[in-house]
Amino acid sequence: MSEPVVLQSASGPVVTIRLNRPDKLNALNEEMTEALIAAFADAGRDPSVRAIVLGGTGRGYCAGQDLEAFVRMQLSPTPVSVADHLRRGYNHLVTQIRTIEKPVIAALNGIAAGVGLSIALACDLRIAADDAVLTLGFSKIGLIPDGGGSLMLPLLAGFGRGLELAWSSDKLDAHEAQRIGLVNRVVPAANFEIETLVYAQRFAALSPIAVGLTKRAFNRSMIPHLAQWLDEEAEIQDEAAKGPDLREGVTAFMEKRTPAFAGR
């Protein structure tokens, strides 16, 4: 029997949720997204859980959307629009992460890319191994940052730097990501798991009432329009996906070549 695509483990009041498709660098498909939504729902409801860590098994945190699964979904007899795909999956997950009134910490090792990075940016805090590499990658296949990335990236890195990263899909090492505000803490890869647990335990030991209400206050002061924006972001992504550049971008990615975008 195959292993579950999402693993959960507890260490006292800290629950760790792990993406578990290491052979695919934990690329997200519908099964994994649904499992993540269920795992966060369980952790959110459990009063014994005071902090949640989101990480990945194997050599990387998350390589983003599984493009092969995405293509199969688009070619199915009853294809789902990109906007609906985002609303029922990643947007639901991001909303959960932001509304669970407990610390949610993304643990980044190896690659953190695409919507995997967007989800990490939606978490409250990010700790990275010193071998972590962060990149958006959406522009390389003719798309915009989704999963809340178009909101959280400029909020954390600033408008100009965020736009540059979204357009360029440049790769950032962990220390540069920390310098510009995308990562809170960088630790040696050799000690990553224990350092992450110690970091999470620090916040789990605080007053859960104060922690939860502080998160609510920050949400209301900084991103009160999150739900509305996720919906609008999905519509913009749907427009991008209907153009010719997505097909060229995905084909070029599969063929390991530079895309030749035609535009409108």
Image (cartoon, rainbow, N blue to C red):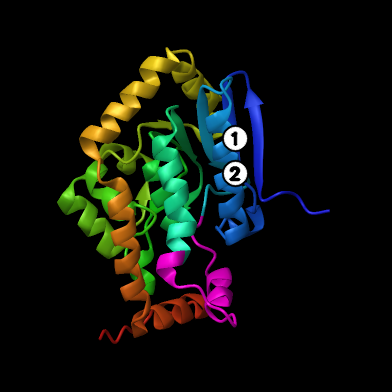
The type of residue carrying mark 2 is Ala
From this view, report whether residue 221 is shown above or below residue 211.
below
**Camera-nearest residue between 110 and 226:** 226
Task: Determine whether the residue tagged by mark 1 lies in a helix, strand or loop.
Answer: helix
Q: Position of residue 159 (x, y in %)?
A: 17, 50
Q: Residue at x 66, y 51 (%)?
A: 5
Do the numbered discs 2 and 1 sit on residues whose CB atoms are within 8 Å?
yes
Quarter of the image that includes the C terminus: bottom left
Q: Pointer 2: what residue? A: 38
Above or below 245: residue 219: above
SS class of the residue under badge 2?
helix
In the displayed structure image, the side of residue 122 where residue 13 appears, left or right: right
Which amino acid type is shown beneath numbered disc 1?
Asp
Is-magenta flag for residue 73? yes
Question: Which residue lies under the disc numbered 1?
Answer: 42
Task: Residue lying at the far left in this picture: please name it.
Answer: 160
Total marks placed: 2
- How packed is label 2: few (under 14 Cα within 10 Å), some, or many (20 or more)? some
**In front here: 184 or 97?**
97
How far is mark 2 from mark 1, CA to CA? 6 Å
**Residue 117 location, x and y as percent?**
41, 50
- Identify the residue at horizontal 65%, vertical 36% (top origin): 8
Q: Quadrant of residue 135?
A: bottom left
Query: Image quadrant of residue 144?
Result: bottom left
Q: Position of residue 211 (x, y in %)?
A: 38, 20
Q: Position of residue 76 (x, y in %)?
A: 59, 80
- In the rendering, which numbered label is found on residue 1? none
Q: Is residue 156 left or right of residue 79?
A: left
- The magenta stretch is 63-84
Indicate yes or no whether the magenta region holds residue 242: no
Name the residue located 15 percent from the left edge and 53 percent from the top edge.
160
